Image (spheres, coloured by chain):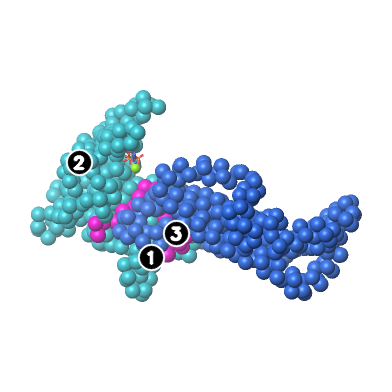
Chain colours: A blue, B cyan
Amino acid sequence: MSAALSADVRPARKPREGAFDGVIILVVVLALWQGVHLYAGESAIASPLATLTFLAEFLRTPVFWGHFGATMAAFGYAVAISSVLGVVLGLVLGVRRFAGDVAEPILAGLYSIPKVTLYPMILLIFGLGMSAKVAFGVIHGVVPIVLFTMNAVKNVSPVLLRTARAMRLSQPETIRTVLAPAVLPEMITGLRVGFSLTLLGVLIGEMFASQRGLGFLIVNGINLHNVRMTTGMIVAVIAFALIANGLLLSLDRRFGRTPGGGSRAA
Amino acid sequence: MAVVHNLAAARGVPPAPVATLRGVTRVYDGERRVEALGPIDLDLAEGEFFAVVGPSGCGKSTLLDVLSGLSRPTSGSITFEGRPVEGEVPDGVGVVFQEDASFAWLTVRDNVAFGLRRAGVDAAEIARRVDYAVGFMGLADFAAAYPAQLSGGMRQRVCIARTLVMRPRLILLDEPFGALDQQTRLLMGDELLRLWRETGATVLLITHALDEAAMLSDRVGVMSARPGRFIDLVETGWPRDRDSRIVSESRFGALTGRLWSNLREESLRAMGSKGAAA
Ligand SMILES: Nc1ncnc2c1ncn2[C@@H]1O[C@H](COP(=O)(O)OP(=O)(O)OP(=O)(O)O)[C@@H](O)[C@H]1O
Ligand SMILES: [Mg+2]
């Protein structure tokens, strides 16, 4: 019997294997980057070496950290707002099935419109600066969080709720000990998607109408023909996004997937 | 042959019914009105092992739903230990559902301990009772596994253990062995009989296996096609101290035969009405 169990449990991936894959990917990316640089020329994209030397210096200046801080602040507010708003709305719409059924196509529709077209309106409402960036981040991030959370609640098997009633659990107990753990995996996936899109929204916001932040530095680099600045900031943004996503993925692995659900995760 | 087969009778007291159903019906009022159950009249004697058989879709799970208090009957009344059952599951009733209801985020051990932890039982006692229940259900090697790592039959056993550790006085089981192979099913039946004898609990077991009903129970209620009513109540007359070896007795064949002759026509009707609806 225990043999059946050990056959079921997937052997964990060796960490060294993962590191090896990472090195290969890094080498391929650097080679591609160098290739594009040679093809498109110095005026479109800086070489990896030039960019990294530039970054090594620029990252030591307070100028960079000022802009980085501005992006982080906007991202932080935007993530907080989209998470709380998204989870609360998703829970309410999931529990009130009828409202959820009405809201779902509307949300899916909202989600599919190119949000850049709303930008002028956002600017008129919030003016230039922090609040517009935050608003733009929230617009991008909140809808997937709502949709994922709502579906997570809808997908909770009714027999689990019947079990809670058969065990005479109170409503708060049911929410805490049955509903919450049952919806958590899908909700965390929604948050992960929402985080990436929120960052995208904030950066786009910074590109169009702001004097602060990494998005501004990218556009400003283009305007000033500072190719190293543009390339360097793009690399910085990508690095940040990768790190954030990696952290969330590990969170996802820890709490998100059904424990032991090897077959589902594979 | 007068056989003593419940605790109250053993003490020489007339058995007081643990649960009663009087004129119970259940109608599902959706887009399509479905008369699912009844009218049902039934007394479950204390310590009795009662099996329910009936054609698919006849209302067996609906009967469990209303008897447990999970849903209200459309008409009629239900009592448990003398008190009316009204839309809430009374303390002392344990339910095992037909569907897999294991908690995917908890290990087997934590699943089984769930109810006890909540009830504030002290840790040593929880460990003792959980170990016993987990071993009892043949899950000892899997105590630290998650439901996703188990087969359907094993998950169902987790749910049975989770209900049994609470020591319910009335145990309602909805096709708990449905996902098991025949051999395991017989052995689990023996375990259930042992537990029933040891605890003196009253058991209502829904099953689609006629031999299981004939072998395990004191009494079998045979249900008609939907809306399910009892068309026959068969006393098996087995001694309280019994196990799966009674399948070799001649009376076992006669019992199963009687159940089937009752059910054959109803099953045909159930299939026929399904065919007409499709
Ligand atoms: N929530 C519901 N709404 C509407 N109709 C329902 C509902 N639940 C069950 N029914 C119908 O009531 C009838 C009885 O269902 P029930 O689940 O009680 O049957 P069953 O005897 O347990 O069937 P099975 O042997 O397949 O488990 C069926 O025709 C079913 O379609
Ligand atoms: Mg059923």
Q: Which residue corresponds to the image point at 31% horizontal and 50% vertical from the top-left?
A: B173
Q: Secondary structure at mark 3?
A: helix
Instruction: Give the side of residue B212 with respect to residue B85, left or right.
Output: right
Examine the image and state in which quarter residue A229 appears.
bottom right
Q: Which residues are magenta?
A: B90-110
Q: Nearer the viewer, residue B237 or B122?
A: B122
Q: To which residue does mark 3 refer?
A: A180
- The CA span between labels 1 and 3 is 18 Å
Q: Position of residue B46 (x, y in %)?
A: 18, 55
Q: Which residue corresponds to the image point at 27% horizontal and 37% vertical from the top-left?
A: B27
- The CA span between labels 1 and 2 is 37 Å
Q: To which residue does mark 1 refer?
A: B113
**Nearer the N terminus, badge 1 or badge 2?**
2
Please, what is the three-letter code of the amino acid marked with disc 3?
Answer: Ala
Please, what is the three-letter code of the amino acid marked with disc 1?
Answer: Ala
Instruction: Give the side of residue A236 with respect to residue B201, left or right.
Output: right
Please, what is the three-letter code of the amino acid marked with disc 2?
Answer: Ser
Protein chain holding label 2: B
* Cβ at disc 3 under 8 Å from ligand 1: no
Is-magenta flag for residue A238? no
Q: Which residue corresponds to the image point at 40% horizontal and 48% vertical from the top-left?
A: A96
Q: To which residue does mark 2 refer?
A: B75
Nearest to viewer (mark 1 / mark 3): 3
- The CA span between labels 2 and 3 is 35 Å
Instruction: Give the side of residue A200 with respect to residue B53, left or right.
Output: right
- Tags 2 and 3 both on a single chain: no
Q: Which residue corresponds to the image point at 55% horizontal and 62% vertical from the top-left?
A: A80
Marking on residue B16: none
